[in-house]
Image (cartoon, coloured by chain):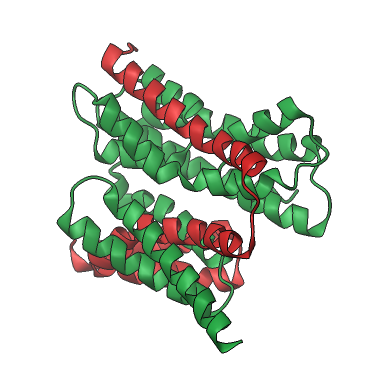
Amino acid sequence: MTVDPHTFLAILAMAIATIATRIGGLVLIRFVTIGETQRRALEAIPPAVLMAVIAPTALVTGPAETIATVVTALVAMRLPLLAAVAAGVVTVAILRMALGA
Amino acid sequence: MSMAPLIVAVMPIGLVFGAVAAGKGLSGVEVTLMSALVFAGGSQFVAMDIWTHPASWAALAFSALLVNVRHVLMSASLGAKLQGFSGPAKYASMLLLADEIWAMAEMRAKEGKLTPAWFAGLAVPFYLVWVTTSLAGALLGAFLGDPKVTGLDFAFPAVFIVLVMSFWKGRETGAVLAASAAAAVLTHHFLPGVWYIAAGAAAGVAVALLGRRREEAHA
């Protein structure tokens, strides 16, 4: 149970970067008025970022991950978060075993 | 309680994060510190992806900035709906911002009024569960088995898939998602690091703004 100084510095740097993003929006709205165009750009960012984060896993990792992505998305249309996540995890585990990946 | 499913959903993700981080050589204290101070699962998983020994603070801070830049927009959007909050309470609340908390708070703001007590009741348990399950994952990592075999490594992308679906507003969202996915996959293939996240975000916003100009041209 030790703390490496490089690791500690990296964690602090990550924390400062993340805090800046969390506070950034509050500071931003004090100086910038959000019009229709800005609102549209703002609204597009969260789904675009989430999609970008999962795209490599979902689309180009292998058939098990791609199929599990589709299953998760389909279940999410009808059932709550946890059920969709469980369906995705179970699907990926079974398919990896079946496909030997 | 509307937040119960969220808190149950974050548990396996915290456990997996702790296990993955321990596998990368981080101690239990280091895992706990990261979850407590950074408290942003997406960037913490990406950090484990690019972790080196010794850790490179500049690369890790930059990737955290890229992955978390969406918080700027979330806090800008939510900030306008925190009328009942004092100045310090606004900033304190935003320090506990996370995708799931943001989505719940936006939904709540649509239906009624956001209060500091409601926000704390959602964010504080979520935060505590994230930190404690991360530590538990680091300590139990060896007993959970290989996350690839149990499929638990997919828990985190699965949560993001569900969140993406919750942003669906019709064909226009489809165009944004398609542009983001294409840009992210291409960039991921050709450039190292986390540029693919910035590329996907930029492509998605570009498509959203193009759609607006086309609408105006028709009007």
In the displayed structure, does residue B90 sit left or right of residue A57?
A: right
Percent of width and height locating residue B116: 78, 35
Q: Which x, y percent locates residue B158?
A: 44, 58
In the rendered image, the vertical position of residue B160 relative to residue B98, given as above or below: below
Residue at horizontal 34%, vertical 71%? A67
Q: As drawn, is B201 to the left or to the right of B149?
A: right
The residue drawn where x is 23% and y is 56% is B188
Which corner quadrant of the image does residue B121 belong to? top right
- The hue of chain A in the figure is red
Along the viewing direction, whichever of A89 and B78 lies nearer the viewer = B78
For the residue pair A68 and B47, the one nearer the viewer reads as B47
Q: Is residue A96 left or right of residue B34?
A: left
Chain the render paints green = B
Q: Can residue B101 be seen here? A: no
Q: Is residue B44 left or right of residue B127?
A: left
Q: Quadrant of residue B7?
A: top right
Q: How many numbered marks does the figure carry?
A: 0
Q: Residue at x 80, y 41 (%)?
A: B83
